[in-house]
Image (tube, coloured by chain):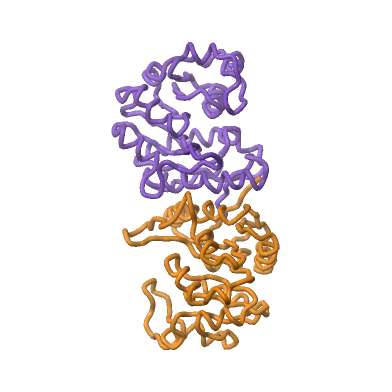
Chain colours: A purple, B orange
Amino acid sequence: MKIAVLGTGMVGQAIAGRLDALGHDVTLGTRDPQGTISRTERDGMGNAPFAAWASGHDSVRLTTFADAAAGAELVVNATSGHGALPALQAAGAENLAGKVVIDIANPLDFSNGFPPTLFVKDTDSLGEQVQRAFPDALVVKALNTLNADLMVDPTTLGEASTVFVSGNDATAKATVTELLTSFGHTDVIDLGDISTARGTEMLLPVWLRLMGALGTSAFNFKIVR
Amino acid sequence: MKIAVLGTGMVGQAIAGRLDALGHDVTLGTRDPQGTISRTERDGMGNAPFAAWASGHDSVRLTTFADAAAGAELVVNATSGHGALPALQAAGAENLAGKVVIDIANPLDFSNGFPPTLFVKDTDSLGEQVQRAFPDALVVKALNTLNADLMVDPTTLGEASTVFVSGNDATAKATVTELLTSFGHTDVIDLGDISTARGTEMLLPVWLRLMGALGTSAFNFKIVR
């Protein structure tokens, strides 16, 4: 499938790399491709510059948000929470219309330090904001509840765990579930319409506290039933 | 141990019954004991009147919040979210001082229908409100993330799952962890201080959506790591 991944950070790299390895035709979208590829310093989280990743992924083309989305059948939003709507606006509503848009972003607000709070919650969600902003896109919230490595290969945990899909379109959720299954996810729960993204986005506060308590982000929720 | 359980609803009954069966000296606290025991109609959730439960639990004494707390070494708050602070105020700060107070209540607001929202979240929690209101109590948030039956016997799920403790006092958390272990919980994660109750209280929105999606409340979170 022709897939655009918006965002070149850890999540974007992990998703793009995995989709590429699975044989998809992957394009990475960014605001300023030339700036992204020419950056030589580590980012604020200490991650290596994008060029280091790109040199090992020749078949993944880096381009603008709009160009990536225009050529794609499916779009993955792998930006930060604050970056989601600007990136999708840059991608262009006309390039998202009728397409499945997987929204992985979490509405984290780091402006008051760590742990971050959520800039939207409980009575609304980032997933819903994206769906309202792009009514012709088939938005599916997914994969925002585990770290980038586990998103694309949960088998390293050695035990099955759970991921969730939230969205208004059943066919879109089936498409996303198939992609998640190809990543190795064996338990994908369909929570319901896009408003159920409130629930999965509100998992982040306990996720962050668990990371602190366990001293690792290599964990995931499993719904035992 | 002499334990007071505040609240006579499903959670209070489950906790009191289990503690009684385990040999503890259990007192149930309520606002109006005579009213509670004489009620003959089912409650708003369709549950049998309290007297039906009480007739099978002769050794559990029903009394006022204050009398229950006064005679207890450990207090369990099993009220609704809105009922928590009024119940504990009725119990009396002097009857809570120096004691472990397990807070199970969730800050659910049903005033706008179902699913409920949270009346405190993200930058504060009900657990913290309770701790601030009763600074001399040793508040531990626990058991608010699963249904009443599973709180007191998680083994019916057939697979180990996870519960959490949040609190400022390590000894109090150790006492609660021991109690949880006696209920059959084998994976108790200490998330940190009472502010980590924000995380577990914010699990409720996804819990409620999972109940809808799965058609049962007989499930629990397991942290796979």
User: Going 60% across and 13% down the picture, which residue do you hit?
Assistant: A55
Place of residue B81 in the rendered image (x, y in percent of width and height, measured from the top left): 45, 65
Q: Quadrant of residue A215?
A: top right
Residue A62 horizontal side relative to residue A208, left or right: left
* Quarter occupied by the N terminus of chain B: bottom right
The count of marks equals 0
Q: Quadrant of residue B176?
A: bottom right
Location of residue B189 with respect to A158 vertically, above or below: below
B224 or B205: nearer the viewer: B205
Place of residue A159 in the rendered image (x, y in percent of width and height, measured from the top left): 65, 45
B27 or A74: nearer the viewer: B27
Place of residue A193 in the rendered image (x, y in percent of width and height, measured from the top left): 37, 45
User: Going 58% across and 77% down the picture, which residue do you hit?
Assistant: B4
Residue B88 horizontal side relative to residue B161, left or right: left
Residue B175 horizontal side relative to residue B125, left or right: right
User: Going 45% across and 24% down the picture, which residue do you hit?
Assistant: A6
* Quarter occupied by the C terminus of chain B: top right
